[in-house]
Image: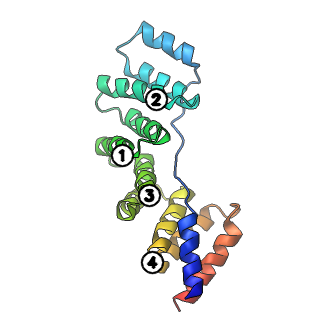
Amino acid sequence: MTRIMKLKSLAVFTVLVALVAAPAIQAQTIDDAKTKVDAMPDDPPRHYNLGIAYFKAGQYTNAIGAFQKAVELKADYKEAYYNLGLSQQKAGQTSNAIKSFQKATAIDAKYADAHGALGSAYQKLKNSSSAIRSYRAAIGINDKKANWHYNLGILYQTREDYPNAIRSYENYLRLAPRARNAASLRNIVAQMKDAIR
């Protein structure tokens, strides 16, 4: 019983936010990106690139504005919705981020990164059912992202669903065998296996 309580406590305190990298674009300064927007203000990718420049500079409120303009000009711009969501999350607007990630996945149901980011946002709001569903959708599309397996393991462990937690952590360890937390996670997996015997 004490072992299970320790495992549950560890899961509660061990939260890894699955923020995924923005798609690769040509590096631009904010000033360069603004100049390009001024030259063609109705071009969605130019607003998108400005948003990326703001995001990289840590100016999340400005990034939100640029990504919102990009999706206003091009309603099916999944990458802009995705990065809008990342910016909103960074700005502490998790509920808005969820809406943006949902729009990205509605445009492209196979957009794994958006599903993963949605899982992270739900996890931050402690909505474990929706987080699990989102991470599982992401993994169903791309099972090579170790952090999604890890976060899924945390969610299952917190729910005391040890068989699924074990499976998720083992997938994480298979993908990230040299991760800093690998040794301690192997120990946790062994403890969970003992607990369910």
Q: Which residue is mark 4?
A: 161
**Mark 4 belongs to which amino acid?**
Asp
Q: Which of pointers 1 and 4 indicates the residue nearer the eye?
A: 1
The quadrant of the picture occupied by the N terminus is: bottom right
N-terminal-most mark, 4 or 3: 3
Q: Which mark is residue 123?
A: 3
The CA distance from mark 2 to mark 4 is 39 Å
Q: Which residue is mark 1?
A: 95
**Mark 2 belongs to which amino acid?**
Thr
- Which residue is rendered at x = 47% and y = 67% of the image? 155
Q: Which of pointers 4 and 3 indicates the residue nearer the eye?
A: 3
- Which residue is rendered at x = 53% and y = 67% of the image? 12
Q: Position of residue 108 (x, y in %)?
A: 33, 43
Q: Can you say whether 106 is above or below 76 in the image?
A: below
Q: Dot 3 lies on which element? A: helix
N-terminal-most mark, 2 or 3: 2
